[in-house]
Amino acid sequence: MPKGEGMTVTVRQIKDKDGNVTSDVNGALRVLKKKLMKDGFFQELRERGHFTSKGEKKRKAKAAGKRRYLKKIEKRKAELGY
């Protein structure tokens, strides 16, 4: 993101049947959390919580790749029926 620009979420104004206008803050929080999750913010916070060595990062990446591959193979087997 360019400097000075950040992630923004707008809070919607909701008008109920009595004509009262309220702000949907809970909805805006939900949207913000989804955007942060998609951006990888929470994952980065978890990773920065403690030190991980280079070797450990490699092992985790390799294990994640293996899980993705096995999941893909399982899905393909289910589609083909064997």
Image (cartoon, grey):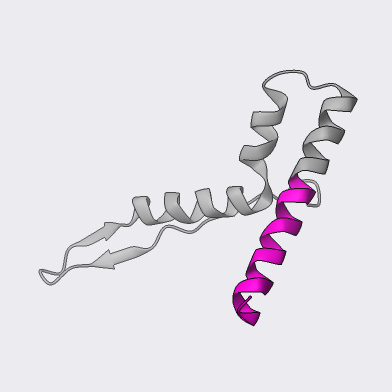
**Residue pictured at 17% horizontal, 63% vertical:** 20
Instruction: Indicate the position of residue 30 as horizontal and vertical percent values.
Output: 43, 52
Measured from the top left, where is residue 78 in percent x and y? 60, 73
For residue 43, side relative to residue 3 (left or right): left
Count of marks placed on residues = 0
Q: Picture coordinates of residue 74 (x, y %)?
A: 65, 65
Residue that extends furthest to the bottom in the rendered view of this protein: 80
Of all residues, the one furthest to the left in this rendering is: 18
Residue name at image x 71 percent, y 65 percent: 73
Q: Main secondary structure of the magenta part?
A: helix
Q: Residue lying farthest top?
A: 51
Q: Which image quadrant for residue 57?
A: top right
Report if residue 73 lies within the magenta region.
Answer: yes
- The residue furthest front is 82
Relative image position of residue 54 (x, y in whole percent) = 89, 26
Q: Which residues are magenta?
A: 64-82
Q: Is residue 32 above or below residue 79?
A: above
Task: Determine whether, in the image, residue 60 is placed left or right of residue 77.
Answer: right
The quarter holding residue 11 reads bottom left
Q: Residue at x 67, y 46 (%)?
A: 40
Residue 33 falls inside the magenta stretch: no
Query: Is 15 positioned to the left or the right of 62 in the image?
Result: left
